[in-house]
Amino acid sequence: MKEKILFIAPANSIHSKKWIEAFLKFNYKIYWISFYEKSIEIDPKIDFFYLKKNIILNYFSLKKLLNKINPNIVHYHYLGFQLYLIPLLNIKKLITSPWGSDIKFTLKNSLKGIIIQKIFNKSSLITVDAKFMIDEVKKFDIKDNNKI
């Protein structure tokens, strides 16, 4: 049986598309959930789900999809809209890839900062796309800096 990866990433971003479609060559079964409508073409081999911006319904929709898909890995991109849902969900293996603006302009002691810290500490791995971002991630008091 194929390994299953669930990406939670905006579907209006070419960055998300490139990252996610790169995993097709590894023969994973790929699922993509977005809180943003698709504005780019997505490979038909990817199972895509669009969740409208409804705070309460999205929690139950995400929970239902996680149970149905039962992914080996959940890869969370873009710590923006509805990030508060991630710490509430039972995710076995979480990989987080914050974008620069997600954390660079977020105060550690703000509500968003506290939620980001919870997400980082729940993550098995945190990926960044620039060396300076390592220090930006570390400002959120991660328990294990080796996972960056």
Image: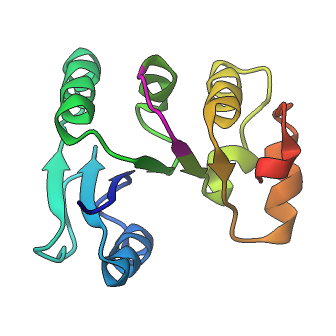
| Quadrant containing the N terminus in the rendered view | bottom left
Please say if 124 is above or below 18: above
Q: Is residue 64 left or right of residue 30?
A: left
Predominant SS of the magenta segment: loop
For this orientation, the residue located farthest to the left is 44
What is the x, y in percent for residue 53?
A: 24, 32
Q: Residue at x 76, y 49 (%)?
A: 147
Q: Quadrant of residue 26?
A: bottom left
What is the x, y in percent for residue 101?
A: 64, 53
Please say if 70 is above or below 61: below
User: Looking at this view, is 62 or 113 the one in front?
Assistant: 62
What is the x, y in percent for residue 13?
A: 37, 67
| Stretch in magenta | 89-94
Q: Is residue 49 left or right of residue 121?
A: left
Q: Quadrant of residue 18?
A: bottom left
Q: Quadrant of residue 122?
A: top right
Q: Residue at x 66, y 25 (%)?
A: 118
User: Looking at this view, is 64 or 132 the one in front?
Assistant: 64
Q: Residue at x 84, y 69 (%)?
A: 131
User: Looking at this view, is 55 or 91 the one in front?
Assistant: 91
Q: Residue at x 24, y 56 (%)?
A: 31
